[in-house]
Structures are given as C-alpha cells and as structure tokens.
Amino acid sequence: MGKRVAVIGAGPSGLAQLRAFQAAKAGGAEVPEVVCYEKQADWGGLWNYTWRTGLDEYGEPVHCSMYRYLWSNGPKEGLEFADYSFEEHFGKQIASYPPREVLFDYIEGRVKKAGVRDAIRFRTTVRWVDYDDATGLFSVSAHDLVNDVETTENFDHVVVATGHFSTPNVPHFDGLDRFNGRVMHAHDFRDAVEFKDKNILIIGTSYSAEDIGSQCW
C-alpha cells in the first residue's frame, strides 16, 4: 500500500502544501496520496470571510476572524507564493497593502490553477489524531458535518495547518460580568455599522485595535 499524508486545514499553509505535492508530481516525482481536511465549506482559512460569528450551522466554532473591511497589515510582497506573483494573477501592479477580498482572490487563484481542490474534504473537521508506535502510523478521526458521519483513517504523515488565530484570547477583567452593554472580542467583529453613534471602549493597541478603532470613528 502506498504512503498517505493527511493535511489538516485548507488555509494558505495547507494549500501551499497541496501545491507542493502537485508540483512534485507534475515534475515526475512519486508522491503519496494526500487527503486534506477542511471544516469550512470553502478554502482560504482565515481569509475565507463569513458574516457568521459564534457557532456555524453545524454547531462548530466559526473559524474566520476577518471583518468586512479588513486590509492587510503586511505588504503583499511578503505574502506572495514563490512561483505566482500578484502581478501575474491580476495582470497589473496593485497596491502593497491590499484589502481582504483581493488577498483571498489571489490565494484562490493560485490553487485553482494548481487543480488541488479534489484532494480536499470540505465540511470535515478533525476530532482526534493518534500515533501508534507499533505500526508507525497516525490515525485521524474526522467528522463529516454535512452527513454527520465520523471516520478514522491511517496515514504515514500528518501536516497540521490549522493556524492559531481562530480562538479568541479573552482576558479576565473584574466587573466585566456586571457590564450591561455588549462585550465582544475582535474575532467576532464584522462591520462598524452596528456601533454607529455609540460609545466604545477598545482594549488593546495592536493591529486589530487600531484598524477597528479607525473604522468605528
């Protein structure tokens, strides 16, 4: 039986891994069977914008932390795939700090060109990964959310590409439980419209705080 590799997550990192295997195969190399698990309905990871917050329609925590008018806080020149430039994708030069939808379009364009979508099991979330010393194999237990079916398969290698920005880090503040207004983490911010003509306290001074504060101003 041939080698098998599981890739957990179809965001930019997971997609880059799929692209690497595709390129190796196109170059004549012998590559393993690759299965990618993605709990969302589409690829892109955090860049796959949704209006949903909290839990999705299957009761799973919403992965996306993107808000409607987010702009990249890093230059596009540091985000390019090595073999696919922004200029090649769009056919022209674009600004160094593009908005969210432009970056998603670029990421999607690269993997569409590579033709790796068939390797991805969408709406399938990995519940557990275990390693067996005796067999040298990983067992990956996953839940098909659409059909409500759980399966376990064996793999020789596992690539974890789930990211670490989808779980809010919410500090404790005394008295917060007695505040009558809305309390939310930046993870659940989607649009400044709901805060029109309201007084807002933003805790934090990093990129999200600056961006959200300027949008709510």
Image: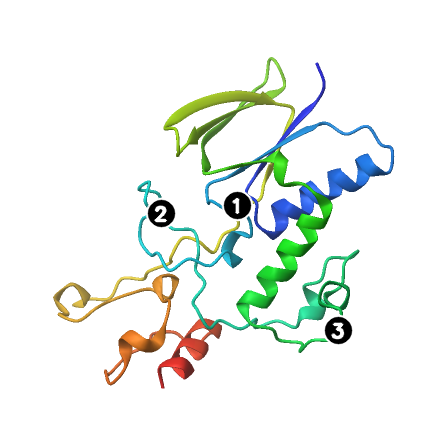
Q: Quadrant of the N terminus?
A: top right
Compared to 45, does 38 lie above or below?
above
Counting residues from the N terminus, which is met first, the one under dot 2 or under dot 1?
Answer: 2
Question: Residue at the spot x=35%, y=76% of the render?
Answer: 192
Counting residues from the N terminus, which is met first, the one under dot 1 or under dot 3?
Answer: 3
Q: At numbered mark 1, what does the secondary structure look like: helix, strand or loop?
A: loop
| Residue on which the image places disc 2 | 61
Q: Amino acid at mark 3?
A: Lys
Label pair 2/1, CB-CB below 8 angstroms: no
In three-dimensional space, the C-alpha distance between marks 3 and 2, rounded to whole angstroms, equals 38 Å
Query: Is 115 placed left or right of 65 in the picture?
Result: right
Query: Is 84 placed left or right of 124 in the picture?
Result: right
| Residue on which the image places disc 1 | 162
- Residue located farthest toward the front when viewing the structure as drawn: 91
Front position in the image: 87 or 137? 87
Q: How is the image coloured?
A: rainbow
Q: Which numbered tag is attached to residue 92?
A: 3
Question: Residue at the spot x=72%, y=63% of the render?
Answer: 89
In three-dimensional space, the C-alpha distance between marks 2 and 1, rounded to whole angstroms, equals 13 Å
In three-dimensional space, the C-alpha distance between marks 1 and 3, rounded to whole angstroms, equals 32 Å
